[in-house]
Amino acid sequence: MENHTINAPTGFLAAGDHIGIKKENKDLTLILSEKPAAAAGCFTQNIVKAAPVVYDLTIIQSGKRVRGIVVNSGIANACTSKQGYNDVKSTAEALAALAGCKADEVLVCSTGVIGVTLPMDIMLPGIEKVFGQLGKDKSSGENAASGILTTDTFTKSAYEEIVVGGVKVKLAGIAKGSGMIHPNMATMLSFITTDADIPTELLQEALNASVKNSYNMISVDRDTSTNDTILVLANGMAGNATIEPNSEAFGQFSTALHRINKKLAIDIARDGEGASKLMEVTVSGAKTDADARTIARSITSSNLFKAALFGSDANWGRVLCSMGYSGGMFNPNQVDVTFNSIAGEINVLKDSSPVIFDETLAEKVLSEKEIHVDVRLTDGNYSATAWGCDLTYDYVKINGDYRS
């Protein structure tokens, strides 16, 4: 079967394994490009930033080309002061020595428990161990996808192919995220590789535009992490003509990159801690793009509505309430709300007046695994879609003993 994992684009290798940071399960992933790659990134907007985020920001903002990424799971290396930053540098140096590159050509990411330093006596030999497993095969890519997970219940990956000037270009991505998920960016890590030849500034432009309507439109629990990071490496080994600004090729690439990010973002929302249902909320007819985005995200973030969704309760009042405190502007006297799933559709609010509906059908509609909430306004022509999940008993259980 053809490889569609993170190492599918030409010139990329990947691996993941258990090195002992966690009690069990894979906890270290390496991604390596055979040639220096253009690098773009987006990071948490939390003022409290983990040591690897601070380190990576410097490299991305410098415009340096990058050879590799080291990712550990189980420990976030956040709120660890000078020691945490020094450990990031040591981690980068370890991969750089093995790969034959400079330390500032290596990006480092961590995810897990905050306030704990990395066990470098485990990390350094672990990097050497996993480096020896780097490969281009599907199994190596799948292991890399597993090595970044924490409370996730499944690996998250995406793959796209486009043709640029007659040349096949590949993009592949992996992500992790389940709890501490909220705009802007979630507690999530996402890594995308591509063999496209694209300048760093255009790669960053495409990423910024995509993040706005993918990762920044998901919410699980209203918490924004200290470690959120998305990185894209483009090594140019596909051999396409360099992608230029405002070109058809740039449009093709941007569209493919967004499809990758959107799929990964939705999978993160689907895999929210303890979640049993994916929620998709579309707000249309808003006066501005900002209003549409703000209102949609407020609905997906409402704990009351999320709890109602868990109970398959068509409590549309919680939708309207969350819209009202969102900060988005709309006419509260002209709102339509419809719930739908593969089981059917029910209109519960028309022109802000309650609609008599079949409660049995409503429960059936809301009992499905994917629920769509359509909110129609009459204020303008803008629309936005956000994703979230229900709030279950298991969310509390998971986070009640996370450190253990």
Image (spheres, helix red, strand yellow):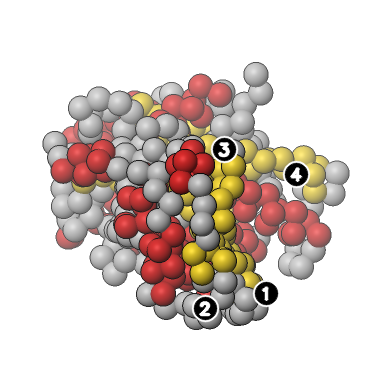
Q: Marks 1/4: CA distance?
A: 31 Å
Q: Marks 4/3: CA distance?
A: 35 Å
Q: Marks 1/2: CA distance?
A: 17 Å
Residue 341: x percent and y percent?
56, 43
Say which mark, if any, is on residue 339: none
To which residue does mark 3 refer? Answer: 343
To which residue does mark 1 refer? Answer: 381
| Disc 2 packing (10 Å; few <14; some 14–19; many ≥20) | few
| Disc 3 packing (10 Å; few <14; some 14–19; many ≥20) | some
To which residue does mark 4 refer? Answer: 162
Chain-order first, disc 4 or disc 3: 4
Q: Is residue 64 visible?
A: no
Identify the residue at image location x=56%, y=75%: 334
To which residue does mark 2 refer? Answer: 333
Q: Is residue 354 above or below residue 65?
A: below
Chain-order first, disc 1 or disc 3: 3
> Amino acid type of disc 4?
Ile
Quadrant the C terminus occupies: top left
| Disc 1 packing (10 Å; few <14; some 14–19; many ≥20) | few
Q: Marks 2/4: CA distance?
A: 46 Å
Chain-order first, disc 2 or disc 4: 4
